[in-house]
Image (cartoon, rainbow, N blue to C red):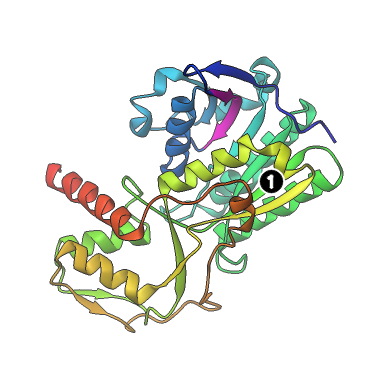
Amino acid sequence: MWPLRLKHSWALISDEYYILMITILLTGATGFLGSEIAKALVKNGDRVVAIKRHSSNLHRLVDIAPNIIFYDVEDLEQSDLLQKESIDAVLHAATSYGRSGESYEEIYAANLKLPLQILKMASAAKVRVFMNVDTIIPSNTNLYSLSKREFHSIGKQFADQKFINFINVRLEHLYGPGDDAYKFVPWLIEGCLKNVSNIALTAGEQLRDFIYVSDAAAGLIKILKCLDEIGGGYQEIELGNGNAILMQKFIKLVHKLTGSTSKLGFGEIQYRNDEPMFSQANLSRMTQLQWQPMMDLERGLQITIESQSQKECSI
């Protein structure tokens, strides 16, 4: 196994405090979570190398794009970026949910083919660690969760064979400003803000753990900064708020905060087959790293609703 210690440098940020700076290869930097990670890394003074597509929209990164080194995924096979950029760690946050009409091939290309290509390159270049942002959704739920589980299994095998250290982070349900409109929370907020006559819902008896996007980004970066404490080989860490809320209560809170007159149609939609009824992160590993989420759910929803309301008013 390659040494876990990173090839880092230290920068003076005050008379007494220093901050660890590392070079991160980040996938998904143009996405909801990835852009938040990129912003936090740049603010920390870390060196960010991001993989994107030729056609990627950089609107989420407009303020920090000059501070990021970009490589296009289409040119990845001909690139020697792992050696050229002296990467300390890979943080794989890119994903395809399959909710925008993507084909099976496109979903697998994003969730299995691309990360496997980077994992093999990282192993060959003796990069210290590959950190994978995984889902808590059961693998039999859909093609998204199945493809994520398959890559996780390959990553574990790479670590077991001592090719590279592999950290699998099982991330709970994200929310926050700027998320994609097709996801549940933005969809719910939009319906409430528009006061649609009826919002069709399941019975809402599920318990879910919601984590604010900036807390998720901070947690992932905390893991990268604490690799010596975490240990090498294969590691699995759960990341969330650590508190599950009844979906019916969550939905009613959004309804209240938006001042909506929409009817909440609980029970009008059937649960999916094998619907998980309880999901909550065990934060014991993160607590050991002296990390905890900072955003209160109600305050996080208020910020998210205000942001989405302003966006809709400007359209």
The boundaries of the magenta stretch are: 18-27
Residue at label 1? Answer: 167
- Residue 79 seen in render: no
Q: Is residue 315 left or right of residue 94?
A: left
Query: What percent of the width, then of the height, locates residue 271?
Result: 45, 79
- Residue 296 seen in render: yes
- Residue positioned 57% across, 44% down in the render: 110
With respect to residue 201, does 194 lie above or below?
Answer: above
- Residue positioned 33% across, 74% down in the render: 249
Query: What percent of the width, then of the height, locates residue 81?
Result: 64, 20
**Total residue callouts:** 1
Q: In this view, does 176 lie to the left or right of 143?
A: left
Quadrant for the N terminus in the image:
top right
Query: What percent of the width, then of the height, locates residue 293?
Result: 46, 51
Identify the main secondary structure in magenta.
Answer: strand
- Residue positioned 58% across, 60% down in the render: 145
Residue 284, quarter of the rendered image:
bottom right
- Residue positioned 42% across, 49% down in the render: 294
Residue 137, quarter of the rendered image:
bottom right
Between 82 and 3, the residue placed more toward the observer is: 3
Residue 20 magenta-highlighted? yes
